[in-house]
Amino acid sequence: MPDELAIRGGRPVRSSVLPYGRQSLDEEDIAAVAAVLRSDWLTTGPKVGEFEQAFARSVGVEQAVAVSNGTAALHAAMYALGIGPGDEVIVTPMTFAASANCVLYQGGRPVFVDVEPGTLLLDPAQVEAKITPRTKAIVAVDYAGQPCDYDALMSIARQHNLALVDDACHAIGGAYRGRLVGSLADLSTCSFHPVKHLTTGEGGMITTNSAELAQRMRVFRNHGITSDHRQRAQSGGFYYEMVELGYNYRITDIQCALGLSQLRRLPEFVRRRRQIATQYDQALSDVPHVRPLSVRDDVSHAYHLYMVQFDTEALGVDRAAIFAALRAENIGVNVHYVPVHIHPYYRERLGTGPGLCPNAEAAYERLITLPIFPAMTDADVSDVMAAVRKVVVGITR
Ligand SMILES: *Cc1c(COP(=O)(O)O)cnc(C)c1O
């Protein structure tokens, strides 16, 4: 039987696995890295500042601080804002754990606020009820690549004297009401992990219009020392001062050269991601029991991820069964995310758990992430849709 599901012994839609995300590197990227390897500076050299300036310009802010990964970027943001023991920070549960862990690194307490059911973005209407005299900041996440409602969040933040942080790891290249992601909050963070929009292998960036916050983060990423190796080399001296307890969160020139080269290609990467998302939207419109997340009309979505929700009640099977069936068809589906407040660490240390954020929990039971990355071909897109159709029809047989 040609239509027998692969999980039941049928022939899979694809003969090799299509991953959910993957980097796109070209010869120019490779040449940029090779040039740094032949230069004097492998780290704390000129490429770091060049990448920071180019990145700041590309999102339309004054300052960008490059760090070793997206998690370090979030940690630096919490540090720069002075988050400490006793402080509360409002966080969405529908994210990678790092968005909340950064609060714990500084001794603060993440307070989870539920998401809107359609977009799975932090619900501004539920934020105010969780604000206490100890609340210092909000960490919003542009889940999947769709910017949050920043006018609503900023108005709440300003009214209560809170800092607003955009964990923009999914959304570089996106926009909200005509303003670019990276410029929408007091601090915005992003990651250059290979599955993200652009890659440096590992890497991260914080963008802001505050020179003071940027300076604090530059000291923080270098052990809390106020000058770096190259500055001392230029001045000819040895003396340096450690004035804060920082970390080694530096990024190398090798990575920044790759980042600079990749940044050129960002518009093309985002354009292709949007094109694939449109193809998925169209193909899914006549497939029963599967729907994409809602997209507001005042955003330009950057589509780091393309998520669908399966109507598991109508299909009569759980998400795990659909997931396994799609994987058997060699579609590298994934799930983003286990809501952070459900993780054992959070339950044990913070007493969170099921029931705290019902919209996020309900969505999690139905969510599957379909492959999306710039190098996907139209044939790859067709394979994904063929597998989704095959599974929806076949799984209930
Ligand atoms: C990828 C990601 C991070 C962490 O970035 P790393 O570079 O892997 O440390 C944080 N938050 C979100 C939403 C992410 O997607």
Image (spheres, rainbow, N blue to C red):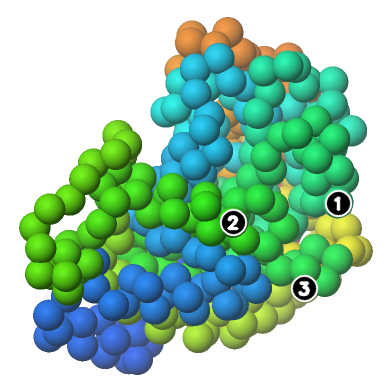
From the viewer's perspective, is residue 22 above or below residue 160?
Answer: below
Q: Quadrant of residue 300?
A: bottom right
Residue at 68 percent of width and 62 percent of height: 183
| Residue 55 in sight | yes
Percent x, y of residue 212: 52, 52
Residue that label 2 marks: 210
- Locate the N terminus and report the quarter of the image it occupies: bottom right
Residue at 67 percent of width and 18 percent of height: 134
Residue at 64 percent of width and 45 percent of height: 165
Mark 1 to mark 3: distance in Å? 27 Å
Q: Quadrant of residue 173?
A: bottom right
Nearer mark to the viewer, of 2 and 3: 2
Residue that label 1 marks: 151
Nearer mark to the viewer, of 2 and 1: 2
Callout 2 secondary element: loop
Nearer mark to the viewer, of 1 and 3: 1
- Residue 278 is labelled as 3
Q: Marks 1 and 2: in contact by CB < 8 Å?
A: no
